[in-house]
């Protein structure tokens, strides 16, 4: 409309005065209406803040990783129940087919033990395992089951396969989501471990506020407090123990690598939470540093070449030529050469002057 708006300190003060005196300025406007208007405005602002808050982008990740862990527990419980249930009928199958999902598919495909001779398991197990399964079904010592039992076993198998399929799709969703929210942390320790760290901390911002020592033992709180009460050695790692970088080393190197990895994780998560770039440049550099550190410590532990990080022996400032004795480096030899055994030095004679009275 061609009207220029003025916004300054005087305008804010004027608006505060108008709001404070609205019941006197507007006829029929009461204090209760003023409170209701303020409350409605506060609710609207709160909804806006919650809707567009940058801290809430990781809420989906926290819920998804919690569901992922619950699915793992449920699938394991169902598999244990299936192996016990079907093991009464065909106990030898569990020793031949060790993978849980393949075991479920074999049971769902065949059912009763008598059907294995005429069932084709091609595409589920290799040919030699199929042959072993069919041979074991002919001499199995399991008990007999009826068709009603078979129906409920099939229903349990379908439930396990469906849960496993959903778990796989949820894992893919988590990986894509984590690479968008925290690319650097996901690069150095993996998407699943990053999601577990964020879920344990409560949010990405809370995890960024943690020091490296807290990130190192995050997930091992019970063991930490138990060690502090009993005055034992505190744990060296928590959730980050599942990382491939730590599982690649052995012995005392695990503690050193976990300390270095926690420090780099703290750097990466702060860059993810407060930085502007979406590329995992810091994560790649930190991962390369950890891999080089693992190579150096592993070589040092084995006593082999350490890539230029050789320690010199204390006092070995002079090289020995051909294994010969280096007299120049031996200052004690020079002192002994000057002294004649059996005859005291001049300094010793001065110190041992006898006073005469």
Image (spheres, rainbow, N blue to C red):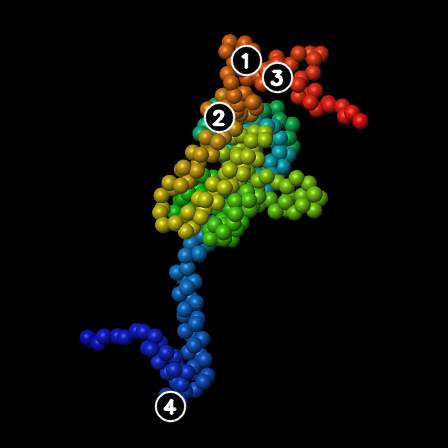
Q: CA distance from mark 4 to mark 3?
A: 111 Å
Asked if the residue at tag 1 contacts the one at tag 3, i.e. Cβ–Cβ closer than 8 Å, the answer is: no
Q: Is residue 338 above or below residue 80?
A: above
Of the residues under marks 1 and 2, which one precedes in the sequence? 2
Q: CA distance from mark 1 to mark 2?
A: 25 Å
Q: Residue furthest right?
A: 357
- The circle on residue 309 is 2
The residue shown at (45%, 85%) is 31
Q: Secondary structure at mark 4?
A: loop
Tell whether 22 sits left or right of 141.
left
The residue shown at (35%, 76%) is 12
From the image, tell me which residue sits under label 3: 335
Q: Position of residue 196 (x, y in %)?
A: 51, 46
From the image, tell me which residue sits under label 4: 27
Q: Position of residue 43 (x, y in %)?
A: 44, 71
62 and 335: which is toward the camera: 335
Q: Position of residue 298 (x, y in %)?
A: 52, 26
From the image, tell me which residue sits under label 1: 326
Give neighbour class at mark 1: few <14, some 14-19, many 20+ (Cα, 10 Å): few
State the quadrant of the C terminus.
Answer: top right
Mark closer to the observer (2, 4): 2
Q: Is residue 86 above or below residue 313?
A: below
Q: CA distance from mark 4 to mark 1?
A: 108 Å
Q: Secondary structure at mark 2?
A: loop
Q: CA distance from mark 3 to mark 1?
A: 15 Å
The residue shown at (49%, 27%) is 296
Asked if the residue at tag 2 contacts the one at tag 3, i.e. Cβ–Cβ closer than 8 Å, the answer is: no
Q: Secondary structure at mark 1?
A: loop
Of the residues under marks 3 and 2, which one precedes in the sequence? 2
Q: Is residue 11 above or below residue 355?
A: below
């Amino acid at each position: 409309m061609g009207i220029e708006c003025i916004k300054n300190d005087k305008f804010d003060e004027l608006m505060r005065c108008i709001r404070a005196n609205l019941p006197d300025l507007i006829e029929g406007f009461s204090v209760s209406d003023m409170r209701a208007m303020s409350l409605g405005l506060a609710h609207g602002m709160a909804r806006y803040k919650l809707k567009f808050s940058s801290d809430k982008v990781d809420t989906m990740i926290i819920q998804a990783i919690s569901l992922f862990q619950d699915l793992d527990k449920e699938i394991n419980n169902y598999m244990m129940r299936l192996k016990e249930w079907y093991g009464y009928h065909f106990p030898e199958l569990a020793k031949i087919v060790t993978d849980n999902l393949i075991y479920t598919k074999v049971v769902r495909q065949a059912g009763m033990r008598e059907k294995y001779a005429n069932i084709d398991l091609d595409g589920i197990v290799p040919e030699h395992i199929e042959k072993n399964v069919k041979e074991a079904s002919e001499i199995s010592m399991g008990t007999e089951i009826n068709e009603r039992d078979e129906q409920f076993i099939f229903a349990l198998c379908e439930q396990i396969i469906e849960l496993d399929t959903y778990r796989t799709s949820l894992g893919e969703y988590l990986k894509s989501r984590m690479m968008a929210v925290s690319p650097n942390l996901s690069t150095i320790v993996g998407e699943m471990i990053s999601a577990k760290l964020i879920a344990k901390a409560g949010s990405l911002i809370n995890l960024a506020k943690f020091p490296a020592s807290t990130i190192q033992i995050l997930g091992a709180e019970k063991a930490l407090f138990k060690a502090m009460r009993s005055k034992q050695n505190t744990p060296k790692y928590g959730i980050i123990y599942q990382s491939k970088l730590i599982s690649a080393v052995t012995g005392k190197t695990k503690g050193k690598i976990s300390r270095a990895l926690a420090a780099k994780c703290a750097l990466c998560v702060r860059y993810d939470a407060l930085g502007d770039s979406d590329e995992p440049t810091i994560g790649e550099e930190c991962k390369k540093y950890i891999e080089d550190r693992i190579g150096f410590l592993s070589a040092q532990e084995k006593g082999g070449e350490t890539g230029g990080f050789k320690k010199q022996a204390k006092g070995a400032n002079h090289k020995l030529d051909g294994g010969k004795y280096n007299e120049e480096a031996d200052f004690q030899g020079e002192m002994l050469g000057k002294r004649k055994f059996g005859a005291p030095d001049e300094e010793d004679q001065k110190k041992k002057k006898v006073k005469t009275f």
